[in-house]
């Protein structure tokens, strides 16, 4: 039995988009042609790769296994093409890295900037997601590596800790902040709740207000719109906010996750090395 390259290409794009219309457009195919290629692939493999749910397509267990294989094959193909056209001294290729906003801008991008300057052929697609979205981003192959603030513990994945984020309570230096208003990204942001679950000193009342992203939270605290539970490394040098004393230390692990596989491209390995070497310094 042989896996059709046309079928695999159709499957890979559909697995990334989880939407037949979008995948067909990306591949320059009609929806019926794309569906036919996937159906033929499923018939050849004698498995179902997708199931339809009210929210759209979802990969089956067989589909997840095939997606892992297809992603590895794509990495191998990209590296081979560069080896043929390029040189051993200059690394090139495309890599997709997804993380939550606070560490992406303050830690991940700065850690890899030197590598990208030294090797202009490297292209990294930096993606910002809410924490709850990141597991699905990796499962659907929208990213090659994700960064989260907890250990997923899922089989078939490699995970390692880059460092630990320490959280503190901050308020404005210039303005009187309401002591019961705490600012978060949005309703699903659990930083404030988790922080106070680990404290003996808890406010009697917490009113939440949402600012969209971590830098919006810091701006709002500076303006005296409320307090916030914030990563210490993001405010260490900020003269417009101050840390509220009296709380116990609370830390979360900054973890990288990617699929276990028998082969990793040179670019993948180099990015991991750079992150492990440089990222912890940004937490000081």
Image: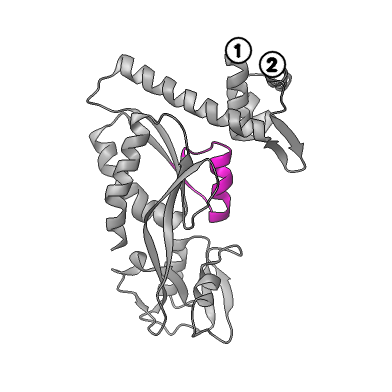
Marks 2 & 1, CB-CB < 8 Å contact = yes
Q: Residue at x 51, y 29 (%)?
A: 71
Instruction: Relative to 228, say whether 68 is above or below.
Output: above
| Label 2 vs 1, first from the N-terminus | 1
Query: How far separated are the C-alphas under marks 2 and 1?
Result: 8 Å
| Residue behind mark 1 | 2
Q: Secondary structure at mark 1?
A: loop
Q: Secondary structure at mark 2?
A: helix
Magenta highlight range: 126-144
Quarter assignment of residue 242: bottom left
Callout 1: 10 Å neighbours few (<14), some, many (20+)?
few
| Residue 222 spot, x, y in % from top left | 40, 73
Callout 2: 10 Å neighbours few (<14), some, many (20+)?
some
Instruction: Relative to 3, say whether 202 is above or below.
Output: below
**Left or right: 121 with respect to 67?**
left
**Left or right: 172 with respect to 133?**
left
Q: Residue at x 53, y 61 (%)?
A: 212
Q: Locate the N terminus by quadrant.
A: top right
| Residue behind mark 2 | 44
Instruction: Relative to 114, say whether 224 is above or below.
Output: below
**Left or right: 99 with respect to 205?**
left
Tell whether position 59 is magenta.
Answer: no
| Residue 114 spot, x, y in % from top left | 25, 42
Tell whether position 129 is magenta.
Answer: yes
């Amino acid at each position: 039995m042989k896996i059709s390259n046309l079928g695999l290409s159709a499957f890979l794009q559909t697995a990334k988009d989880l939407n037949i219309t979008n995948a067909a457009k990306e591949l320059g195919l009609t929806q019926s042609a794309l569906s036919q290629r996937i159906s033929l692939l499923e018939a050849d493999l004698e498995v179902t790769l997708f199931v339809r749910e009210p929210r759209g397509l979802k990969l089956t267990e067989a589909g997840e296994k095939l997606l892992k294989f297809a992603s590895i094959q794509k990495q191998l193909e990209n590296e081979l093409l560069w080896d043929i056209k390029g040189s051993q001294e200059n690394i090139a290729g495309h890599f997709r890295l997804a993380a939550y906003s606070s560490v992406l801008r303050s830690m991940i991008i700065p850690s890899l900037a030197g590598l990208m300057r030294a090797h202009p052929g490297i292209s990294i697609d930096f993606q910002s997601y809410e924490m709850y979205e990141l597991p699905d981003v990796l499962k659907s192959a929208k990213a090659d590596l994700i960064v989260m603030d907890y250990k997923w513990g899922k089989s078939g994945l490699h995970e390692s800790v880059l460092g630990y984020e320490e959280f503190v309570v901050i308020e404005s230096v210039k303005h009187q902040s309401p002591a019961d208003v705490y600012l978060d990204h949005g309703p699903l942001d659990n930083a404030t709740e988790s922080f106070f679950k680990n404290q003996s000193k808890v406010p009697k009342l917490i009113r939440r207000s949402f600012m969209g992203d971590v830098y919006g939270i810091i701006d709002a605290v500076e303006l005296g719109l409320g307090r916030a539970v914030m990563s210490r490394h993001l405010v260490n040098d900020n003269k417009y906010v101050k840390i509220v004393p009296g709380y116990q230390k609370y830390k979360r692990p900054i973890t990288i996750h990617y699929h276990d596989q028998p082969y990793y491209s040179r670019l993948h390995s180099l990015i991991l090395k750079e992150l492990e070497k440089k990222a912890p310094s940004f937490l000081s």
